[in-house]
Image (cartoon, rainbow, N blue to C red):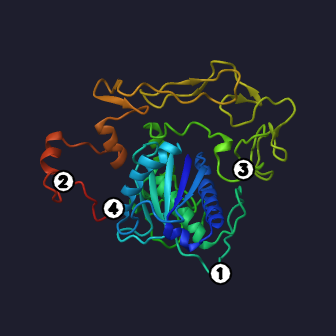
């Protein structure tokens, strides 16, 4: 996930120093990346934009309204000058309608909807250190309680963007095998104890979302020079001068890579984890490296030269799919029924167009475009 973090003016005023704000944003992004790594997802921070002089739009009041304004600003102003997959706004404002933040459900890769907003807590006068698992640091860590809460909140919003739903009681979700003393990241937010790991339900939601083609923009690895922060050996991102990067020495399990130097071991042509690498050697040209994720996606094959799978390709938008009942868009077959089931579960079915046309215009409890009391 190529991420851009935006810090509004109220959040900047909590730490009125540009370098300190950027350092804190890097730490938050690092924590978010650590949360997602067990799911096989990496979060790469491309940039931090700080509104030190003033907000680009009105942020306070309703979280839903602030989210809509942020998504509009992202599409119209941020995306054209800085291509990315997702943007998250850190705000010092307090919303009237939610506890911690809001994001657009199952919207990853959408130019118009891929983003979220999160409230940041005020600085703790005496930061409390937390005993967390070994992390891959991007910047020096202070692990204040407020920073961890923000990282958990951002991961929660990003989870919604990736198609994850809340870990409600009826779903029997469990993340105790990950962190026995903390809650799950996708539990309904309370603004109190932060979740530190994703549950089995979150993993299932993510897998389902990817099968539906929601992550079509996530297969590319960002160029090292596009990453925010200073490059160093051990951050699991391949940067200039490195032949591989399997993390810190204590966590590296790649026999092809020297974790101390971030160079391939003698005789190795590639590193473990590369899609076109096996036993430290390049796979032959034509070897399949990415299966199609549905009828609108296309398979990719190794070229025998690079250890990486070629960029993801898919059918042109507008090609018919689902036996002519829908059209391909962004590599996914966007059927009405499929989108309904993705949002509401496999047993859901869409209503007829005549029902929508007659009820939604009334704006009553039977049919409307507003938000229900339960969110």
* Residue at image coords 77%, 51%: 248
Where disc 4 sits, the SS reads loop
Task: Return the disc, 3 or 1, that comes first in the chain's sequence.
Answer: 1
Mark 4: few, some, or many residues within 10 Å (few <14, many ≥20)?
few
Q: Which of 360 and 82 is in front in this view?
A: 82
Relative image position of residue 312 (x, y in whole percent): 54, 30
Is mark 4 in CB contact (under 8 Å) with mark 2? no
Report helix, strand or loop for mark 3: loop
Mark sitting on residue 126: 1
Picture residue at 78% right of the left edge, 37% below the top: 243
The residue at the point 45 percent across, 49 percent down is 77
Q: In this view, does 144 lie above or below 337?
A: below
Q: Position of residue 262 (x, y in %)?
A: 80, 43
**Which mark is first along the chain, 1 or 4?**
1
Q: Residue 367 carries which label?
A: 2
Which residue is more in the foreground, 292 or 203? Answer: 292
Within 10 Å of the Cα at label 3, are there few (<14), some (14-19), or many (20+) other Cα atoms? some
Mark 2 crowd level (few <14, some 14–19, many ≥20, 10 Å Cα): some
Vertical position of residue 299 compared to residue 85: above or below:
above
Disc 3 target residue: 235
Which mark sits nearer the N-terminus, 3 or 2? 3
Q: How far is the residue under mark 3 from the one under mark 1? A: 29 Å
Query: Alpha-carbon distance for marks 4 and 1?
Result: 35 Å
Q: Do the residues labelled 1 and 2 touch (CB within 8 Å)?
A: no
Residue lying at the far bottom of the rendered structure: 125
């Amino acid at each position: 996930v190529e991420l851009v973090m935006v810090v509004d003016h109220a959040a900047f005023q909590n730490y009125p120093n540009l370098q300190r704000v950027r350092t804190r944003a890097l730490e938050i992004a690092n924590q978010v990346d650590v949360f997602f790594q067990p799911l096989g997802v990496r979060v790469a921070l491309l940039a931090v934009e700080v509104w030190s002089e003033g907000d680009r739009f009105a942020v306070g009041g309703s979280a839903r309204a602030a989210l809509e304004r942020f998504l509009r600003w992202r599409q119209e102003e941020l995306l054209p000058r800085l291509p990315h997959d997702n943007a998250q706004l850190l705000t010092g404002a307090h919303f009237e309608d939610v506890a911690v933040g809001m994001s657009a459900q199952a919207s990853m890769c959408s130019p118009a909807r891929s983003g979220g907003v999160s409230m940041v807590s005020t600085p703790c006068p005496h930061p409390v250190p937390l005993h967390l698992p070994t992390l891959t640091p991007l910047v020096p860590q202070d692990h204040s309680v407020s920073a961890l809460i923000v990282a958990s909140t951002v991961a929660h919003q990003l989870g919604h963007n990736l198609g994850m739903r809340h870990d409600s009681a009826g779903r029997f979700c469990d993340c105790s095998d990950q962190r026995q003393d903390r809650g799950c990241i996708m539990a309904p937010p309370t603004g109190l104890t932060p979740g530190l790991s994703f549950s089995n339900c979150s993993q299932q939601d993510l897998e389902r979302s990817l099968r539906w083609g929601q992550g079509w923009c996530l297969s590319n690895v960002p160029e090292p020079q596009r990453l925010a922060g200073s490059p160093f050996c051990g951050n699991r991102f391949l940067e200039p001068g490195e032949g591989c990067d399997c993390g810190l020495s204590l966590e590296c399990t790649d026999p092809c890579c020297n974790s101390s130097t971030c160079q391939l071991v003698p005789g190795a042509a590639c590193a473990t984890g590369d899609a076109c690498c096996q036993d430290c050697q390049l796979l032959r040209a034509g070897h399949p490296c990415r299966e199609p994720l549905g009828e609108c996606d296309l398979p990719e094959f190794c070229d025998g030269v690079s250890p990486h799978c070629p960029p993801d390709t898919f059918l042109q938008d507008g090609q018919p799919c689902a036996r002519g009942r829908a059209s391909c868009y962004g590599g996914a077959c966007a059927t009405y029924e499929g989108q309904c089931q993705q949002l509401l579960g496999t047993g859901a079915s869409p209503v007829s167009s005549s029902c929508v046309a007659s009820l939604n215009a009334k704006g009553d409890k039977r049919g409307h475009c507003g938000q229900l009391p339960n969110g």
